[in-house]
Structures are given as C-alpha cells and as structure tokens.
Amino acid sequence: MYGAGGAAASAAAAAIANAVKASGVIIRLKPDEFAKILRRAEKPLVVTARGGWMNRTYKYMTSYKGLCFYTAAKEALIMPSDVEMVYSEKIWIPG
C-alpha cells in the first residue's frame, strides 16, 4: 500500500502526533510576540536553551493562562527584569 518511503513517512507522522499528544499544545510565536506575552505575565518563568549546530539559535518557552508559548531567535532576547530564567540543555518542539 505505502512502499518503503510511504511507510517511513507514516511512521514519522505518527511519532510527531504522539509527541504532540504528550507535550500538549505549544504555540509558536515570533520573538516580538513572545516578548508581549512576557510583559502581560506576572513574574513569568522562561525556559531557555541554545540550539542548532551550524545555525545557532536561542530557544525560549513560557506559559501564560494555561498555554505554552515558544519562540526561537538568532540573537539572545532581552528579558524583563521580573523574568525567572531556567537554563536547559535542550528544547525540542514536535513537528
């Protein structure tokens, strides 16, 4: 029915779907929109990690009103003074 390539694609799609189920809803934002969320939150907690090998990026996650927000930027973002930072080895987002 699928052939070797189709079966691999189906398996990859299923793995992504399972990862999304396990991690819940993650909303990907541009860095400026992520900054707006941080300004709205009271004492926000941000998890950050450096990613990539050739193209280094800074990755950030926070929660606000029960939702998880994520962004990535080529340069480190300047955080508001009330942000509590947690430095992670890696942030992986499904899909």
Image: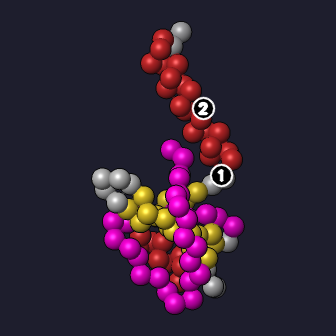
Q: Based on the picture, tell me whether residue 9 belongs to the magenta stretch.
A: no
Q: Residues within 10 Å of mark 2 (few under 14, many from 20)?
A: few
Q: Nearer the viewer, residue 68 or 60?
A: 60
Q: Position of residue 8 (x, y in %)?
A: 50, 23
Q: Position of residue 72 (x, y in %)?
A: 42, 63
Residue drawn at the location 54% of the way across and 47% of the way down: 94
Residue drawn at the location 55% of the way across and 32% of the way down: 13
The residue under label 1 is: 23
Q: Amino acid at mark 1?
A: Ser
Q: Indicate the secondary structure of the residue bearing disc 1.
A: helix
Residue drawn at the location 58% of the way across and 57% of the way down: 26
Q: In terms of sequence position, does the residue under pointer 2 or pointer 1 come before the other?
A: 2
Q: Answer whether residue 61 is visible to the viewer in this image.
A: no
Magenta extent: 66-95
Q: Amino acid at mark 2?
A: Ala
Q: Answer whether residue 12 is visible to the viewer in this image.
A: yes
Above or below — where is 3 with respect to 73? above
The residue under label 2 is: 14
Alpha-carbon span between mark 2 and mark 1: 14 Å
